[in-house]
Amino acid sequence: MAGTREGAMSILIGVAARKEHSVKTTVKISELTDLKPMAKRF
């Protein structure tokens, strides 16, 4: 089950994709937020 953190991360993927399209270079999620992906699910 996804929570708010996962929802925020998925939105950030879309934001990064749109920004990449406009600036024509790679955008890292870490450039957009200080949230860190969590490898473990509890």
Image (cartoon, grey):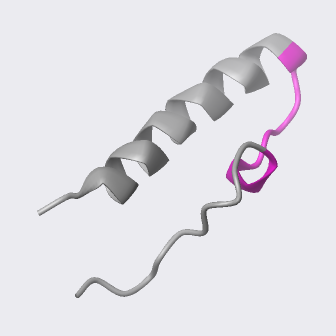
In the rendered image, residue 24 lying in the magenta stretch gets the answer yes
Reply above or below: 17 against 41. above
Picture coordinates of residue 36, whole percent (x, y): 60, 69
Q: Residue at x 23, y 57 (%)?
A: 3
Looking at the picture, tell me which residue is in the foreground, 30 or 27: 30
Please name whichever residue, 20 or 31, is drawn nearer the observer in this view of the structure: 31
On screen, residue 13 versus residue 29, left or right, reads left
Instruction: Indicate the position of residue 19 as horizontal and vertical percent values.
Output: 74, 22
> In the picture provided, is 34 more to the left or to the right than 7?
right
- Toward the top, the furthest residue is 22
Of 28 and 7, the residue lying toward us? 7
Give the residues drawn in magenta, as a range.
Answer: 23-31
Horizontal and vertical percent position of residue 40:
37, 87
Relative to 18, is 11 above or below? Answer: below
Image quadrant for the C terminus?
bottom left
- Residue found farthest to the left: 1
Say how many tags the image has: 0
Please indicate whether residue 11 sits to the left or right of residue 35 in the image. Answer: left
Horizontal side, residue 13 vs residue 21: left or right: left
Q: Decide which of 28, 8 is in the foreground and name it.
A: 8
* Residue depicted at x 88% and y 30%: 25
Q: Is residue 16 magenta?
A: no
Q: Image height check: is 38 above or below 31?
A: below
Q: Residue at x 43, y 45 (%)?
A: 8
Dividing the image into 4 quarters, which one contains the N terminus? bottom left
